[in-house]
Amino acid sequence: MRVALKSLAWRDPLDAFAPFADEPYAVLLLSGGEGRARWSYLCRNPDRVETVGPSDPDRGFGRLRRLIGAHDANSPDGPPFQGGVVGLTAYEFADRLEPIDLPRDPDWPDMILARYPAILAFDHLTLTVWGVARGPTGVAPNGAVDDPSMWLSQPSTAVATRPHPAFDADPPSCAYENAVGDVRRRIADGELYQANIARVWTGRLSHDAKPFDVFRRLVEQSPAPFSAFCRLPGRAIVSHSPERFVAIAGDGRSVETRPIKGTRRRGCTPEGDEKLKAELVASDKDRAENLMIVDLMRNDLARVCEPGSVKTPHLFNVESFPSVHHLVSTVTGRLRENLDAADLLDATFPPGSITGAPKIQAMKVIAAHEGPRGPWCGSLFWAGFDGALDSSVLIRTAAFVEDSDGWRFRAHAGAGIVYDSDPLAERRETEVKISGLINALRGAR
């Protein structure tokens, strides 16, 4: 298949996407800045969509492999993603990899895959937009998307409506703190070392508001390297995740994961902010929590990487976002020959940072305290025709479902519980993590 690239004048990706925000299977993967946050992607008009529902017999990510087909090289002059599959995998897809009898979310399938032969790629470093089309002659096989540069001709839309949601009752503080206490007792009994336990917020947008209104406010106020808006028939995902799950570079072999564990809120003054950052770096509890997940992810990568190739080049780095500081580590490896993105996802899903250690037992404990998570703590990913992959952990994410009364939503925030956890402090951590999303839902700053 030939890849056709067209260099285009810069346009802000949020404005470029806005005319398509109500179009089924329109996706905006939004980032900004240098390095890993350099590229954003606008995907629409897929030529094939597949949904993995409760009755589907597939156990792992083999459907993804079949949908991509034989690997096809990218143009060396273009962006990392030059067309392929965008996938949304719910947390409960994990039951297909290791049966645990997780409660299923009736509103969301286990996985949705959409294949895009044409996309727009936004280079935040050079302020250039690339139109990418792939087909026998460089024109996508779906005639509706043969020239993605035409998508930029659509006019900008009006400023977002204030969402003004009606929230259901706030999640009770005592119930969460009791759950933390139960996990601590299980840890003391030797059942596990760590589990990520969540709270859930639910509500409904005002009748004139839409999920994209929330997303627009969210990324303006609280940008993140893995922000995403995904519009599906009767559903939508709004995410401002800071966390990479797993990635494969364009060589098809170099693998990376960047688990987050350890959080502090941002300070009100520069001095106070630096003090909180230093406190996070020096925290034995947070470092131990992070190290447990690093060890888990090293073990997961070792299942599909060459022996001796799994390394930890960065341990306990601090990354700062508008409302929080996070402790982030980096684990790398080299994928074994003849393995691919589906094999990597099979070996690592669900992300260790939002389950715990040991992973399977932590998931059983989570299921004892929570209902279905749905998309939250699943993954949103792109998988290129060339074999490359990038994926986020769907934290800081709201899932929207449309019904006769408009849009209802559900959002979670969790914390990693270890033996030294303080129930009050963990509950407050969930409130810090959800604050950016709640402000965007309320239209507040």
Image (cartoon, grey):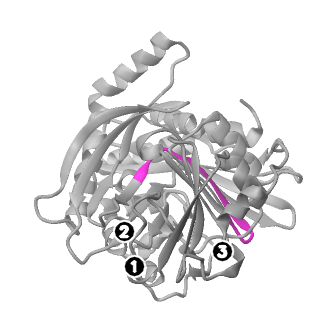
Could you tell me if residue 1 is visible in this image? yes
Could you tell me if residue 190 is visible in this image? no
Q: Residue at x 50, y 33 (%)?
A: 321
> Looking at numbered disc 2 in the image, what kind of residue is underneath it?
Leu
Horizontal arrangement in the rendering, residue 59 relative to residue 287 (left or right): right
**In the rendered image, which residue does mark 2 sit on?**
345
**Residue 285 included in the magenta stretch of the image:** no
The quadrant where residue 372 appears:
bottom right
- Check disc 3 and report its element: helix, strand or loop: loop
- Check disc 1 and report its element: helix, strand or loop: loop
> Looking at numbered disc 3 in the image, what kind of residue is underneath it?
Asp
Question: Which stretch is magenta?
Answer: 231-244
Q: Position of residue 439 (x, y in %)?
A: 69, 36
**In the rendered image, which residue does mark 1 sit on?**
60
**In the rendered image, which residue does mark 3 sit on?**
146
Point out which mark residue 259 bears.
Answer: none
